[in-house]
Image (cartoon, rainbow, N blue to C red):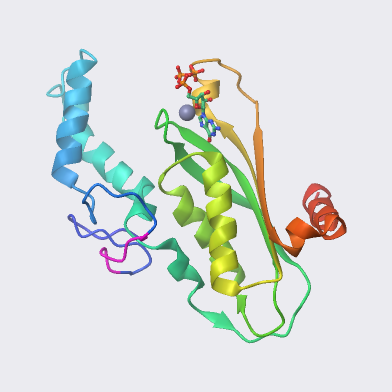
Amino acid sequence: MIGEGSDVRANGHSPLEVDAELPRSGHAVFDQERAERAIRELLLACGEDPEREGLRETPARVARAYREMFAGLYTDPDHVLDRTFDESHEEMVLVTDIPMFSLCEHHLTPFHGVAHVGYIPNGQGKVTGLSKLARLVDLYAKRPQVQERLTSQVADALNRKLRPRGVIVVIEAEHLCMSMRGVRKPGARTTTSAVRGLLQTSASSRAEALQLIKGRR
Ligand SMILES: Nc1nc2c(ncn2[C@@H]2O[C@H](COP(=O)(O)OP(=O)(O)OP(=O)(O)O)[C@@H](O)[C@H]2O)c(=O)[nH]1
Ligand SMILES: [Zn+2]
């Protein structure tokens, strides 16, 4: 998925196709060398010896891992919704239990769980491939994130690109910053939701969607 060297590409898009809304620090590509230096510094700061056998390759490895985990910074996730097809379906389309991995922007530790993404097409063609809903979650997740913003960004992208009658996004996740450190509450799960259009204005439509999500098993 990711290109070699500093020319980072996800989904084949140019590395310069960045999200205009994203606050940027002047980088349109991942700076591999700088990341390696930073990881080496971190190891030194922790009192480790980056030259010892087991750690010699670690800065380069960790930098590559971050390049992959932050791939959504270097592409516009909305591009995954560029291709739509004509289908006059006007009822809810819902994909549940999409595995989701992201990194919390406060601690850069993972939060992971599942996303449920649904929309009501407008009946005038704009239907997307089901896999694109999962790809959208994936790319917005591949940024330093907070769960609330991730949830809204996925909902807003669907709203913007498909002009649907309604959108619902629910994310259930465990934050490792709450499990393996800090308050140490493994198993605590956070649920966030974002609704747009009819699913925001109509309590009965929203209740129906939430019922489909809750009763999925
Ligand atoms: N709202 C929200 N908070 C988050 C998310 N991820 C992590 N946090 C919280 O971000 C907060 C950062 O709090 P701080 O007091 O600045 O940092 P801290 O001293 O490391 O806090 P503790 O985690 O309580 O040890 C913590 O309460 C985290 O639980 C998220 O996705 N959404
Ligand atoms: Zn955190």
Q: Is residue 19 magenta?
A: yes
Asked which quadrant contains residue 108, the reply is top left
Left or right of 183? Residue 57 is left
Instruction: Count all numbered tags in the image, as a single digit.
Output: 0
Q: Is residue 96 magenta?
A: no
Which residue lies at the image location 26% right of the left edge and 60% below the top edge? Answer: 3
Asked which quadrant contains residue 61, the reply is top left
Is the N terminus in the top left, top right, bottom left or bottom right quadrant?
A: bottom left
Q: Where is residue 170 shown, x and y percent of the image?
A: 67, 48
| Relative depth, front residue between 135 and 90 | 90
Q: Which residues are magenta?
A: 14-20
Which residue lies at the image location 62% right of the left edge and 50% below the top edge? Answer: 115
Which residue lies at the image location 53% right of the left edge and 54% below the top edge? Answer: 153
Which residue lies at the image location 37% right of the left edge and 53% below the top edge? Answer: 22
Q: Where is residue 209 shown, x and y percent of the image?
A: 79, 57
| Relative depth, front residue between 42 and 125 | 125
Q: Where is residue 85 shown, x and y percent of the image?
A: 59, 84
Left or right of 157? Residue 79 is left
Q: Where is residue 104 shown, x and y percent of the image?
A: 46, 35
As drawn, 80 above or below 51 = below
Main SS of the magenta part reads loop
